[in-house]
Image (spheres, coloured by chain):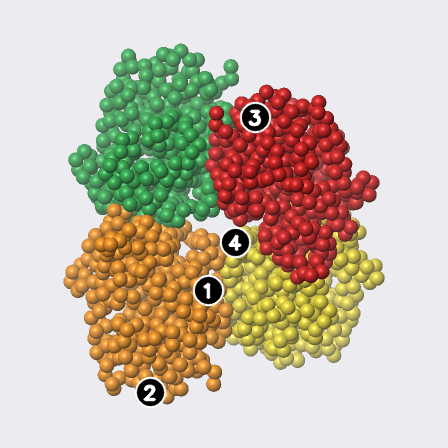
Chain colours: A yellow, B orange, C red, D green
Amino acid sequence: MKKLKVVTLGGGSSYTPELIEGFIRRYDELPVTDYWLVDIDAGAEKLKIVGELAKRMVKKSGLPMTVHLTTHRNEALFDADFVTTQLRVGQQEARIHDEAIPLKYGVLGQETTGAGGFMKAQRTIPVLLDLCRDMERLCPEAWLINFTNPAGIVTEAIGKYSPIKTLGICSGANNMMMDIAGVYGVERRDVYARVMGLNHLIFADQIAVQGQDVTAEFIEKLAKSAGGSSLKNIPDIGLPPDFIRALGLFPLSYLKYFYLSREMVEHSLQDSKAHGTRGEQTREIERQLFEIYKNPQLESKPKELESRGGAYYSETACSIISSIYNDKKEIHVVNTPNRGATRDLDDESVVETNAMIDRQGAHPLAYGRLPVKIRGLIQSVKAFEELTIEAAVTGDYSTALMALSVHPLIPSVDIAGKILDEYLAVNRPFLPQYKFGKAGEIA
Amino acid sequence: MKKLKVVTLGGGSSYTPELIEGFIRRYDELPVTDYWLVDIDAGAEKLKIVGELAKRMVKKSGLPMTVHLTTHRNEALFDADFVTTQLRVGQQEARIHDEAIPLKYGVLGQETTGAGGFMKAQRTIPVLLDLCRDMERLCPEAWLINFTNPAGIVTEAIGKYSPIKTLGICSGANNMMMDIAGVYGVERRDVYARVMGLNHLIFADQIAVQGQDVTAEFIEKLAKSAGGSSLKNIPDIGLPPDFIRALGLFPLSYLKYFYLSREMVEHSLQDSKAHGTRGEQTREIERQLFEIYKNPQLESKPKELESRGGAYYSETACSIISSIYNDKKEIHVVNTPNRGATRDLDDESVVETNAMIDRQGAHPLAYGRLPVKIRGLIQSVKAFEELTIEAAVTGDYSTALMALSVHPLIPSVDIAGKILDEYLAVNRPFLPQYKFGKAGEIA
Amino acid sequence: MKKLKVVTLGGGSSYTPELIEGFIRRYDELPVTDYWLVDIDAGAEKLKIVGELAKRMVKKSGLPMTVHLTTHRNEALFDADFVTTQLRVGQQEARIHDEAIPLKYGVLGQETTGAGGFMKAQRTIPVLLDLCRDMERLCPEAWLINFTNPAGIVTEAIGKYSPIKTLGICSGANNMMMDIAGVYGVERRDVYARVMGLNHLIFADQIAVQGQDVTAEFIEKLAKSAGGSSLKNIPDIGLPPDFIRALGLFPLSYLKYFYLSREMVEHSLQDSKAHGTRGEQTREIERQLFEIYKNPQLESKPKELESRGGAYYSETACSIISSIYNDKKEIHVVNTPNRGATRDLDDESVVETNAMIDRQGAHPLAYGRLPVKIRGLIQSVKAFEELTIEAAVTGDYSTALMALSVHPLIPSVDIAGKILDEYLAVNRPFLPQYKFGKAGEIA
Amino acid sequence: MKKLKVVTLGGGSSYTPELIEGFIRRYDELPVTDYWLVDIDAGAEKLKIVGELAKRMVKKSGLPMTVHLTTHRNEALFDADFVTTQLRVGQQEARIHDEAIPLKYGVLGQETTGAGGFMKAQRTIPVLLDLCRDMERLCPEAWLINFTNPAGIVTEAIGKYSPIKTLGICSGANNMMMDIAGVYGVERRDVYARVMGLNHLIFADQIAVQGQDVTAEFIEKLAKSAGGSSLKNIPDIGLPPDFIRALGLFPLSYLKYFYLSREMVEHSLQDSKAHGTRGEQTREIERQLFEIYKNPQLESKPKELESRGGAYYSETACSIISSIYNDKKEIHVVNTPNRGATRDLDDESVVETNAMIDRQGAHPLAYGRLPVKIRGLIQSVKAFEELTIEAAVTGDYSTALMALSVHPLIPSVDIAGKILDEYLAVNRPFLPQYKFGKAGEIA
């Protein structure tokens, strides 16, 4: 039988059972023979815990799939077919800083965009480009399927600096379509939405249920529900009804960080005072998950994992990998270079949009102009992303400062400078690209 | 059972048995209950002959499909779901003029482009826009599937001047993929080619067989075969091997009109002397076909129809109609507005390229920049097409003259003027949009 | 002698002596024979005061220029050559609301952009389009020189909805070049800066003094001075030195509203508590100015006018009008449709940039891509401007809400809605385009 | 006194007296102290003849300008301020081949475009890029003013492959404006035309005389004169009146090569039979000119030079050099990268259009979309130019073949291949970039 080798970097993540379950469920069409979980030395213990659970899950399935655990990345990469990443450089500790430092200045900290997204990108991009260098030698034809946040930024960096074939994946669009399916009481496969934007900043402008366009009707349901009727099954996107009607698009719920930025900062401050930052909360959830994983009787994904977020993450991931592997030419929402999908962004800018997926990769559908209602926001966040990538690659202080300064959620270049200085100080071990002076000062 | 009403304008065409056969073969997925063949009074006799054959074919199939024949277009259009067009305004006589007049001046006459394409567009666009006006009233939600040449130009005109949903269809790309399938000894469905260009002016730049990229290898096969080895199954595109290698793309065979324009004119002149123009030859083939159609024993598409060209035309047409009807989200090559698929053409310019087809229509895949090797040719023919449409709508003499003058196959604006004047004189009955003076002179 | 008729709408403005002085000083090259000051009935008293001063100034000059005062606009427009506008629909009272309402919600109110710019545009655009309708009849060949804020938005609206030839003028870029001249101890004419952006949102990226490029050196001077050295003659743009270096461009000082938005709101709140809003301060300054203007001995522009701002406003205005009148082909910074100057904005979007000015109008210099450092900000403010114009023309509530919601200085769509509702309530008399319900509610 | 050093490569050209005369006439504003004429060894004799004439002309002028003659290029380049080129690699002999070889196949040979332009570019670009390498070392701040044909292609090559500041110059646009001045009986300086296109392929779409737009009126004069009235002073552009009216633009007379390509080939064939190719005719004219130059009594530009063409060439050249030197910010028509002047061409594509010229260089005026009437032709010739440059730099046979194949004046890729093979054979000494095999065959 032909070998099918899949490698997951950051294999010690609490998400791994999600992926394993997905590969087991899809085995008929995606017959993974060798599944390698890789982590760094500091993650060896977690890797062992989650890896043993993975082995028990596979054993129970009775499938001819072998799970390998290693901290030697190159051993895993050799001749791989698919490499997935779910890294967290600096662990939850780094995330806690990412969130807490901006909050001190009344600025949102969030791992997908803004100050937090910037800092996570600075730590992550050098690691992933280093991975690409290894893949270029060891498995140049393999696909790099990137789940690591900020997924859009990271995918753009790889596309700009490596020939490795790559895609960025996020469950956001899939969740939106599941929400729509819920509203109409149909299956997920009966829903199709045209989506455009950047990772965690997407909008659906054409929504079809069983081939019928329901866009206007669905938007009105959203607005009515937000207006207080709070209709059953209608997702709460947290925006005022008049605004929902004016927008006329279905935004990902993360858009509230932009459309209600003042309120969200206030909420984050209160939440963080009451329960710690989101990173601190996640650290505790993870601790509990690993306790559960340790149970040698456990042979399946525990339902507690769902509370961690990303419930349908394996669904998104495995279906896209299968579409590549089987040359299916299905339409999925992925992060991929724009290449003309909209002329309001550069060709090499990564967008999150519908693309036809086959063995040659992702072929985005032409979208045309961005509606003016969302154009400026997308373009200004893309400028932030472009500068963030340049800073992550060059380690240039001025570029980093500009990246933070142009982000629409950072209301002062003076504060941007203060956040940046604190960030660099605490992240120094993870920033080989930045030139620090003797005393830890950026030269 | 839900009604599915399909209407074919130009139903008296010799091609109709192709379409009927296609609808019968695809009945399971595309259950046409009412199929209307419409023609003008002058075509009533042909309509009767081919319509009776159509009825015999349906009867033999045993399917619950009713074939209707009419010369009252509006009766047919009312509440239609799909309207297809295979018109020939002015019949074969007009085509004979289209070809013969330019040939007198040593200029190619051909119904898809150049002088002939221009003239056919002038006669056809007013008729189709008039059809659209009727559809807007009688079946505003119906799809207009246009096979009428010049298919790209006609589709662009409809898109610019009517809200009716439309697609232009040509069997060219499908034939290219069948050629590739033949070379590799695989099924048509195992072949995928990315195609870009204008109708009858397309190039494949990515060719995959069973998901494997074979582009470079296939191009080399083409070149070797053209170089004299004349390999079995390798299509003959009539171009020199060095040029095929330099191009590095698989062009539709019609490209020889552009790449070997001098030789093709010479060939047309000789062929026309020996056998009459292509229109005269076609007229004779058609006469013979209709003799065959008259046979009351005939209950299926006669194989002589294949020699008429367009053998796989129903395959292309029915599979695309089914993809719309069944919201299949398949990828097909169609003529549809560019909408950013390539930024080297305007958004509203119709291109022939791969598009995802669902109930909402055609969504072209983003293509990116046109390769410089083909960019100029495509752009200059598109300029011709844009001026041709403007002339057909306004009937403006200067615009018509410019259209002919900018076409790369017309080597003199002086000759362009002479061809135009002769064209207008013989086509006067079909050109309501042009203002002729007392003596038939353009004012 | 050939007549040269210039008309100023809003002639009763306190700025009028600036303009008069300019026309007197430039008489040799711009021989205005008839200068018409026009105002509405409510401004008749001010018009009389400032008009009499204007007459005294002209009399003193001894030039053959006649000053006409009228409240009948059409009388003035007939056969005019240049029409300038310095309107303030709703007077200083409206401005006070424009500023005070957003400040209540901790949002900047400012007459050039943000909430205040939006509201001023809603009142002003209908009046100016109405003026254009009159000009189309009475002086279709005249130039409309627009000084009315928000100048860029208003100019774009005119360009989109009227064939009248127009330019938007602001003294900002000229002031920047005077600052540069001051730093280098040279004349203003020795300085040239390439400028790009939107009105009150411009950046110089190429600065030359006597033909020598001094850009990098000048930026470093700015940064050093901001860093505390506070060098003599160096303009204070209020930004941190690290940021100035990172930006590498010379921004108009208004950019601090964007780059230090949090601090500027705080400052506005305090200033407004201590001294009233800027509108209230201006109202008092104007009151004092008109007292001075009343003095029948006064025959020249009083120096107190300079404290009102816009000191070099007539310099900018008259030199541009002269460049048109005399077909000079000089380069000036004006507000004019982009037409490809940068492909990061639409062709019809008005930009403020260097343009060659001749009798045919403004011909912007090609600029190329916007630097990524400023691209997102400019694009997002342009989206606001586009929606603001659409709202001003249609009076559509949703479009108005979107305009405010997408502005980078408005941190919440919920607050945007509250500001909008208060704005509409107090501005009702000036908003014929909005449909208010029975109780003054927007329908 | 400050030195001003100007260097002319190809100084032994018969055009040199033109330039000398220009520098003498403009000495007040452009005080050239050192003028170096450089040529290769093979041109030493001509250099001496024309150089001695130059010295006599300067001596007569009494100006403190020193003329230096050398065959050591680097000696001349050191610390130069302006370097002008009027090279002819391979002399008139190469030109004769450039013209004669395509004519054998019934294809136009012409040194500015088509096959001839291609071949001249292949010889010239390597020499000019080599010059740039030397300038980068010896005079990195100098301006390279390129008159060498094909001027647009050569300028684009330099812009793409060297940081040296450059401009391409042609007298075509200036001649068009002189023609207009002649028609209206005004001075050249009273005429302004907006021009766009590629070198030798330009169109004026806005024509003003003393600031008044006369475009439509002037076009009608052209058409009437072409229609047989043959009006006095009206330039003969050789096109039919209907076509001139349809075009609505004033084309450079070279456009007849494109618009009447069949007739022009016929004419070239007859002319070449009767009088030899244009290269042969020029060789004879040059021979006669050098006889005249030898006359030691001759102290000024002989009027016979005007019959050689390029009469106002020094006017164009010196006024542009002066505009740079004196930071004049005048508008001139030059060849310079598009940088957004029109979005129908790439930013780095060289266009010939109006630009503001100052010490920093050429700043093209934004033009907007190319009119559809000329868009396709310009875009297809630009594709030829882009491929021609790539071939000249890489020496790649396939790219060279594509360049010739895509040119609208070459009617067959088969003929393109034959011309290319003959060209490469006779030009081998001048093509270091091409890899020839043992027997002179391209590998």
* Residue D155 x, y percent position in the rendering: 42, 36
- Please tell me which residue lies in front, B41 or B297: B41
Q: Dot 4 falls on which chain?
A: A
Residue tagged by mark 4?
A343
- Residue holding disc 2: B60
Q: Are marks 4 and 3 in contact (CB under 8 Å)?
A: no
Specify whether disc 2 shares its chain with disc 1.
yes
In 3D space, how far apart are the residues under numbered discs 2 and 3 (Cα atoms)? Answer: 96 Å
Extreme right residue here? A274
- Separation of marks 4 and 3 at Cα, in angstroms: 53 Å
Residue that numbered label 1 is attached to: B163
D183 relative position to B78: left or right: left
Quadrant into which the C terminus of chain A falls: top right
Residue type indicated by callout 3: Met
Residue C353 location in percent, x, y?
56, 38
The residue labelled by disc 3 is C65
Q: Nearer the viewer, residue B203 or B230?
A: B203
Frontmost of labels 1 and 4 is 1
Amino acid tagged 2: Lys
Residue A399 appears anywhere in the view? yes
Q: CA distance from mark 2 to mark 1?
A: 39 Å
Q: Foreground mark, 4 or 3? A: 3
In the depicted view, which residue is nearer to us: A408 or B14? B14
Q: Earlier in the sequence, mark 2 or mark 1?
A: 2
Question: Which quadrant would residue B12 be assigned to in this image?
Answer: bottom left
Q: In the image, D191: left or right of C213?
A: left
Look at label 4 and name its amino acid: Arg
| Alpha carbons under labels 1 and 4: distance apart | 24 Å
Which amino acid type corresponds to the residue marked 1 in the rendered image?
A: Pro
